[in-house]
Image (spheres, helix red, strand yellow):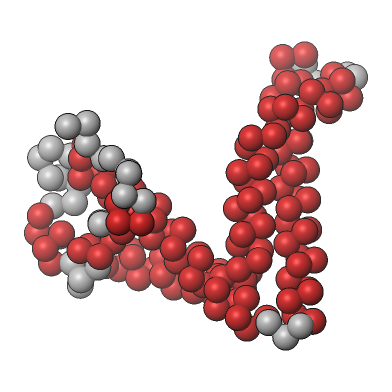
Amino acid sequence: MNWFDICIFIVIVYCVIKGYKTGLVKQLSTLAGLIVGAILSGKLSVLILPYVQHIKQIPPYMAPPLSYALTFLIIIVCFYLLGTMMEEILKTVKMGTLNKLAGIALCLTKWLFAISIVINLIVQADEHHQLIAPKIQNGSASYKYIQPFAPKLVPFLKFSLD
């Protein structure tokens, strides 16, 4: 076990705790809120912009980014509240434990996917193998599983320009 394995272990512990606390429904609703918020905030921020422009303390150049940020925040809060309501419904029909276990699985999948992408980018960019040395890669119990995770999950991901 080396520093790489310790980092992965910390992420796994975090995901188990976070996934169990939030559950699948909140994990999905916050993920959807981030995606929808990023997409729609540019379009919907024009509705908030006139109100932000009327605030005297805000410089005119700050109004557009502030209206985008406010719109983004409103969308995320709406999705969070929707997820909370859906979670309460699941508790009512006695599916709370299943929701929490599925939340752990989704949280682990998201984080391991992101870590795998970062590792593949590092390996591709690090010609001299200084960031993750071959000794670390070969001595790690988890590297051989984490590194190919993203390319196996999404086969069309390309980490080289060859």
Q: Looking at the image, which residue is at 44% across and 73% down?
A: 13
84 vs 72: above or below: below
| Relative to 40, 159 lies left or right | left
Q: Which quadrant holds the N terminus?
A: bottom left
Q: Is residue 57 visible?
A: no
Residue 135, located in which quarter of the rendered image?
Answer: bottom left
Residue found at the very far top of the displayed protein: 60
Percent x, y of residue 130: 14, 45
Residue 125, located in which quarter of the rendered image?
Answer: top left
| Relative to 40, 20 lies left or right | left
Residue nearest the viewer, comparing 102 with 80: 102
Q: Looking at the image, which residue is at 13% across and 37% down?
A: 127
Residue nearest the viewer, comparing 50 with 159: 159
Percent x, y of residue 80: 73, 56
Percent x, y of residue 9: 35, 70
Percent x, y of residue 90: 73, 76
Q: Which quadrant holds the C terminus?
A: top left
Residue 4, located in which quarter of the rendered image?
Answer: bottom left
Residue nearest the viewer, comparing 80 with 131: 80
53 vs 107: above or below: above
Q: Looking at the image, which residue is at 31% across and 49% down?
A: 155
Q: Is residue 95 visible?
A: yes
